[in-house]
């Protein structure tokens, strides 16, 4: 269990750092037309979805059949894509006139950061122990 916590540390740190940046620079973001609340909600959503997908991929990595891991990665990608699409659609419908495109674009950048962290974590876990 300790190993899992150590592996998840970069994901947790990214979540905390992005929240801190948004909260500290909230006035500058508003000056640029970016709604910080939308970014914070997107950050939380990406964090939770990545935790879910990572746990499924971690479990699939231990399976002897390599196809299980490949299917898990593809399913995780689909889950993240559908969650993101659903979140944007819900936001569009809820916000109507107050829809903030810059915040959505900023959130897309955060998604790329989470994607890079996830790939890095999986590569670290996949390294051979004796190499």
Image: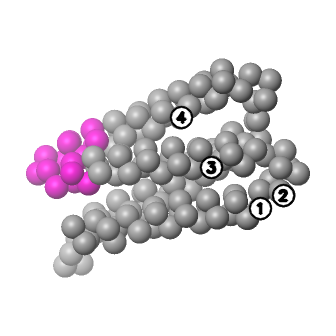
* Badge count: 4
Q: Can residue 126 be seen in this view?
A: yes
Circle 4: element type:
helix
Name the residue tied to disc 3. 40
The earlier-in-sequence mark between 1 and 3 is 1
Contact (Cβ within 8 Å) of mark 2 with mark 1: yes
Q: Is residue 73 left or right of residue 42?
A: left
On residue 84, which mark appears?
4
Q: How far apart are marks 1 and 3 (CA)?
A: 12 Å
> Callout 2 environment at 10 Å: few (<14), some (14 to 19), or many (20+)?
few
Q: Which of marks 2 and 4 is in front?
A: 2
The earlier-in-sequence mark between 1 and 4 is 1
Q: Is residue 72 left or right of residue 27?
A: left
> Callout 1 environment at 10 Å: few (<14), some (14 to 19), or many (20+)?
few
Residue 11 location (% of width, % of height)? 45, 61
Circle 2: element type:
helix
On residue 28, which mark appears?
2
The earlier-in-sequence mark between 2 and 4 is 2
Q: Quadrant of residue 75?
A: top left
> Callout 4 environment at 10 Å: few (<14), some (14 to 19), or many (20+)?
some
Q: Distance between the residues labelled 2 and 1?
A: 5 Å
Circle 3: element type:
helix
């Amino acid at each position: 269990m300790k190993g899992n916590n150590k592996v998840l540390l970069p994901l947790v740190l990214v979540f905390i750092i992005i929240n801190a940046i948004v909260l500290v620079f909230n006035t500058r973001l508003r000056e640029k037309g970016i709604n910080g609340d939308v970014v914070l909600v997107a950050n939380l959503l990406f964090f939770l979805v990545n935790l879910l997908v990572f746990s499924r991929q971690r479990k699939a990595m231990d399976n002897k059949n390599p196809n299980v891991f490949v299917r898990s990665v593809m399913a995780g990608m689909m889950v993240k894509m559908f969650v993101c699409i659903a979140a944007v659609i819900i936001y569009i419908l809820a916000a109507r006139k107050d829809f903030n495109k810059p915040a959505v674009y900023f959130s897309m950048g955060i998604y790329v950061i989470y994607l890079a962290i996830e790939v890095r974590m999986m590569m670290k876990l996949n390294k051979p122990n004796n190499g």
